[in-house]
Image (tube, helix red, strand yellow):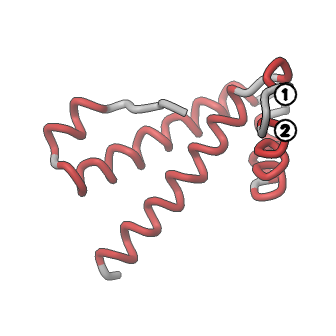
Amino acid sequence: MKTKELIKALQEKENKYFDLVWYARSGPENDKIKGVKENKQRIETLYPNEVNNLQNERGDWEHGFNSGMLAAFRYILTLSEMGKETADDEFPNLDS
């Protein structure tokens, strides 16, 4: 796999886990904020199984897994773009 393809695949996974972490953090109290409902619906359409897993009895575990994946993919992408020192300094970056 070429470097550009590898980076693109990593970015796609980072985007997926960003969406899922954001979704888990966005409670119903945020639905009145412009764009929140639409973004939730987009994520529900893209990742129906993952959203369902967040809403079942293992939701806390799933959210932890998604958060770990987001941190790992961001670490790898930062490592490739800015080097080890920056990646180590920013890890774990879970901003959403």
* 7 relative to 60 in the view: left or right: left
Pick the residue in front: 83 or 69.
83
Q: Amino acid at mark 2?
A: Lys
Q: Residue at x 33, y 53 (%)?
A: 77
Disc sitting over residue 18 in the figure? none
Instruction: Tell me whether the residue at label 2 lies in contact with that at label 1, contact meaning CB atoms closer than 8 angstroms.
Output: yes
Q: Dividing the image into 4 quarters, which one contains the N terminus?
A: bottom left
Vertical arrangement, residue 70 with respect to residue 13, above or below:
above
Q: CA distance from mark 2 to mark 1?
A: 6 Å
Q: Quadrant of residue 24?
A: top right
Badge 1 element: loop
Residue marked by disc 1: 31
Residue marked by disc 2: 37
Residue at the limit of the structure toward the top, as seen here = 29
Badge 2 element: helix
Q: Residue at x 33, y 44 (%)?
A: 75
The numbered mark, 2 or 1, whose residue comes first in the sequence reads 1
* 39 relative to 92 in the view: left or right: right
Q: Residues within 10 Å of mark 1 (few under 14, many from 20)?
A: some
Q: Amino acid at mark 1?
A: Asp
Measured as percent of width and height from the top left, residue 28 is found at 85, 23
Measured as percent of width and height from the top left, residue 32 is found at 85, 25
Count every numbered label the image shows and give the total.
Answer: 2
Q: Dividing the image into 4 quarters, which one contains the C terminus?
A: top right
Q: Residue at x 50, y 51 (%)?
A: 14
